[in-house]
Amino acid sequence: MIQEPSESRERMTVVITGHVDHGKSTVIGRLLADTGSLPEGKLEQVKAFCARNSRPFEYAFLLDALKEEQSRGITIDCARSFFKTAKRDYILTDAPGHAAFLKNMVTGAARAEAALLVIDAKEGIRENTRRHGVLLSLLGVRQIAVLVNKMDQVHFDLSVFEKIKKEFSDFLKPLRVQTTAFIPLCARDGHNIVSRADWYRGPTVLESLDAFVKPPEAEARPFRFPVQDIYKFTESGDERRILAGTVESGRASAGDRVVFFPSRQASRLKTVESFNRRVSSAGPGEAAGFTLEDEPFIRSGELMCREGQPPPVVGSRFRVSLFWMGASPLVAGKKYKLKLGSARATARLARVLNVLDSSDMASTREKEHVDRHDVAECILETTKPIAFDLESGDEGTGRFVLVDHFDIAGGGVVLDAVEDGASTVSEHVHLRESRWEGSAVPATARALRYGHGSKFVLLTGSDGPALESAGRALESMLFAEGRKAYFLGMRSIEEGLDSDVQESFDPRDEWVRRLGELARILTDSGQIFITALTDLDEPEGRELGALNAPNEIVVVRIGLACSGALPAGLTLPEADAEASARAIHRHLIERAVIPNHSI
């Protein structure tokens, strides 16, 4: 087998991209053959296979290992190969060039530090050539060597090469991509791959690879640990609560102070866990677990960072540059699933700022949607804040993908946080209220008849059964007094009010939305609407408040509040349901929701 890179030497990951049939696989096959990097007998084996099947030998067959690819003559998946020079070890990824497999190309280029982009000298720059240039830019690949292949088919005319060089250089300029070299070559015959042809005086492909500059090591960047999941152990007295995930950048050790974003809760690392053992620290690419000295309320999707290092940006509204691959256009108002690091959120397109047609980079500001294969600068909005790093920092925590139904439909980088402009929730509420068909009975007349005002009483805390018991006790107490009160259990929200919950990464997002819309109706009918929802945070509280507007919410917390929790108008110690209900009843009297006497 091909020898994999050594751990002790510098390593670089390079992706080979370009339009279909422009010769990417042939470039790599020839590179491996001419540097002696193939397994012993591999070249002869492939040549013998071609002879048995009456097929002409191609160096691309050394890479296209999948049977479907060999039978169809195109690269579908991303094949990896390894070779080394005196300077460093290389991992080469051959990405598919066909437009139908752009998602596979993105996968292959996602972790690349540099790229070789191949252009057929006779066919010239094609639409997918430009798309690949755009995608490399969005994926943060800033170093590209452009290989103008099949020079034999234009009779080694260097004026053709110079024309392609100028045209593609002009195309790449606005993409913030550095072209380190343009190299004319004939990959089939090995011209300018490892050895320089007599008709050319510039660098070879091999020399161009070694000229790439290794980006700063991920360990030198600020510590970033997307919390993927939280595991609680109980067997044999093991009470560890382990935050699990993969370190994106930086390094953290036991004893370090850490801060979680977006909740901004702080703690200190107690231990660093690896598989079946405890270690002193964890760095980039390592799957690790961390325990904390205390137990703040942390949800999966938070970004753990070291205190004292540059923090990430936190926001729910941000400007992005994205490439859209969905079968249907990206449109405003529709819900999409956004994935950034370990964060999952329901996202909406708030505004299209600018759209580029990636086939010719023509720009338009008139479009209100993004079509397939368009590149766009947009403002996205998520249902709750997430933590991210900006594209300028070259952080993996600044790249995202958008999922439409169950397919990855787009992806890109976050450019900036946006504070101005109305949220999609507030815009929805404004439109809803402008069309609201209210009752003919005024709210004042209804309050006079019922003997109380309407209110949304929202109970929150960490103990779900205790919250529900208190809510039901309050309902019974108010009902016995003749009040129009109704308690709704969250299971009724989760299982009822039919809605497409799977359209949200987190079903809780949809439950909160349903609850807010229902509260608006019930409070408008003059009732005291009571429900309980565990561990409400500030963003959820703001959304419920907006959806219930113009009516108000009375928030009651039972038990201790953790950092990032929704502020409460009334905080109660943990007690039996009747005691909690009596305390809430007194609070409603103080708030003049109900009068201080029985009717």
Image (cartoon, rainbow, N blue to C red):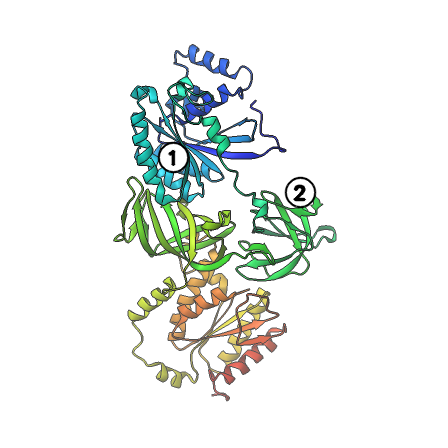
In the image, is 316 to the left or to the right of 217? left
* Residue 445 screen position, x and y as percent: 35, 84
Residue in front for this viewpoint, 287 or 91: 91
| Numbered circle sitting on residue 275 | 2
Residue 444 on image: x %, y %:
36, 84
Amino acid identity at mark 1: Phe
Name the quarter where the N terminus is drawn. top right
Instruction: Give neighbour class at mark 2: few <14, some 14-19, many 20+ (Cα, 10 Å).
Output: few
Labelled pair 2, 1 in contact (Cβ < 8 Å): no
Other residues around mark 1 within 10 Å, as few (<14) / some (14–19) / many (≥20): some
Foreground of the two, 563 or 362: 362
- Mark closer to the chain start, 2 or 1: 1
Residue 390 screen position, x and y as percent: 46, 52
Residue receiving disc 1: 101
Q: Residue at x 39, y 85 (%)?
A: 449
* Up/down of 336 relative to 20, above or below: below
Kindly identify the amino acid type of the residue bearing the numbered disc 2. Answer: Phe
Q: Is residue 205 visible?
A: yes
Q: Where residue 206 is drawn, which disc sits there?
A: none
- Let me know if residue 436 appears in the view: no
Left or right side of 599 for 122: left
Residue at the image position 59 percent from the left and 71 percent from the top: 558
